[in-house]
Image: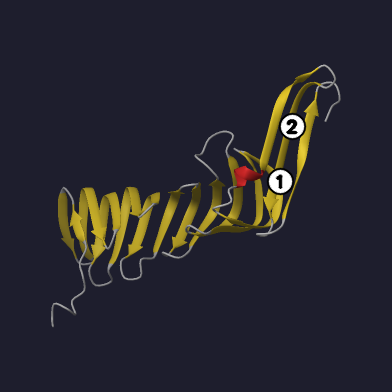
Amino acid sequence: TLLRGAIPLPEITASRTDLTDAGTVFTGNARLTYDGALLIADQISYNPKTQVARAIGHASLTRGPQRLLADEITYNLTDRSYAVKNMRLGQDPLYVSGSSLEGTTDKVIIHDATVTFSEPWTFAPTLNAGTVTYIPGSSVRAESARIGVGPITPIPVPVYDQSVKDPLISHMSGRAGFSSRLGGFLELGLLAPFTRSVKLGGDLDIYTKRGV
């Protein structure tokens, strides 16, 4: 009966262990495993009374297909919630970076967010917003966002709501070439999801013989 009511403990390993009044500090290749979650960092401080772990330095939190990288991660083992500083989050097909984050298993809120809809690279479809709400495996929502390609996000989007199964790249079009009538040309198009059923956007076409 006593064992049945006991609080399950995480498995923690590190090169060095130090006991303090606030808990235990694990330093050097620190790894914490608990209920399918893996927390890795240069240093992990764990308080058994509050069941809160604080990871500092090259910190990462992996849960299923979701992997979070940050300078610092505070993870609550009781409710599986977490908060981070200077983070990068990846779960195909989305990759997110931001200044800070609060999250649970059901919802993640990223501040000063940059979202790329594929592996981050120069021409990846990109969204920037002060706050982005990500429902893992379901949707991305943002207000007062801007979208574009790579570091250039010129298109304002007052309300953005998109399923992760309907990636932004599927609403982009591009064509380049040369013809005797148009000269050299570049044609770009983008539709942004304002709601799940409404998409608005435009085209930008540049021709050496016809202008913009």
| Relative horizontal placement of residue 32, taking residue 132 as reference (left or right) | left
Question: What sort of colour scheme is used for the picture?
Answer: secondary structure
The residue that appears at 62% across and 44% down in the rendered structure is 170
Residue 38 picture quarter: bottom left
Q: Identify the element where label 2 is drawn.
A: strand
Residue 154 % position (x, y): 70, 43
Which dot marks residue 155? 1
Viewer-proximal residue among 142 and 28: 142
Viewer-proximal residue among 152 and 121: 121
Q: Residues within 10 Å of mark 2 (few under 14, many from 20)?
A: some
Q: Are marks 2 and 1 in contact (CB under 8 Å)?
A: no
The residue positioned farthest toward the left in the image shown: 2
Q: Identify the element where label 1 is drawn.
A: strand
The residue that appears at 51% across and 39% down in the rendered structure is 120
What is the spatial separation of the Cα atoms under label 2 and label 1, in whole angstroms? 16 Å
Q: Which residue carries the number 2 mark? A: 187
In the picture, the quarter occupied by the C terminus is top right
- Figure check: 190 above or below 24: above
Residue 130 % position (x, y): 59, 55
In the picture, the quarter occupied by the N terminus is bottom left
Residue 199 % position (x, y): 71, 53
Viewer-proximal residue among 119 and 71: 119
